[in-house]
Image (cartoon, grey):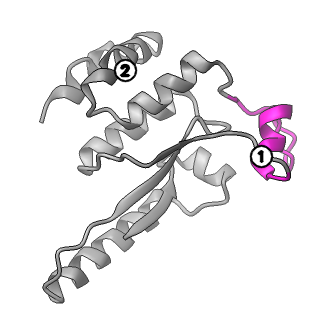
Amino acid sequence: MKVAPEHTKKGVLDLMNKPPIDNFLEFEEIFLKESRKANKEQYLILYLISAFPSSTLNDAIDMAIWLKEHNYRPLQINDFLPAPGEFATAIYYSELDPVTLKKVYVCKKESERKMHRALIQYFKKENMPLIMKALSICKRRNLIGYFTRR
């Protein structure tokens, strides 16, 4: 079953007007329990968005850790792209939350956007150079090797 938590970090989910990731975890638990009860082998396929307004490189690292800890290896990822008429597009261009008028971090550099995506797909060997770069930039070098461990 495809589900769209879209992100794992509270601040990003708040800006998306999405419930906390704990709601997804509750759903996952019920879904897996009911699947076992029905004797069906079913899986959840996550839909995630990389580089959504307010998501920092540290948020992307935290999401990668969350995904690894919960044994998710997402293949379906959308890189955030501004689209006409969308709330998030207003944030992307203004770098302000339209409701509070507070400044919002927006990832616009292509090099950083690639790191966001690579972190979500932490399990792909070809992403390791970008992951290492992100960990270095965020001074989280202690995590080097974490994403290659089983």
- Could you tell me which residue is drawn at 35 percent across and 36 percent down? 121
Residue occupying the point 65% across, 26% down: 107
Characterize the local packing of mark 1: few (<14), some (14-19) or many (20 or more) Cα atoms within 10 angstroms. Answer: few
Q: Residues within 10 Å of mark 2 (few under 14, many from 20)?
A: many
The residue type indicated by label 1 comes to: Ala
Q: Which mark is residue 131?
A: 2
- The quarter of the image holding the N terminus is bottom left
* Main secondary structure of the magenta stretch: loop
Query: Along the line of sight, which residue is nearer the eye, 42 or 92?
Result: 42
> Residue 123 got which mark?
none
- Marker count (numbered): 2
Residue 35's quadrant in the figure?
bottom left
What secondary structure is found at the residue carrying circle 1?
loop
Give how far across and how far down residue 126 sits, in percent. Answer: 30, 22
- Along the polypeptide, which appears first: circle 1 or circle 2? 1
Judge by depth and name the residue closer to the eye, 39 or 64.
Answer: 39
Disc on res. 83: 1
| Vertical arrangement, residue 16 with respect to residue 97, above or below | below
The CA distance from mark 1 to mark 2 is 28 Å
Residues rendered magenta in the picture: 85-106
Residue at 34 percent across and 23 percent down: it is 127
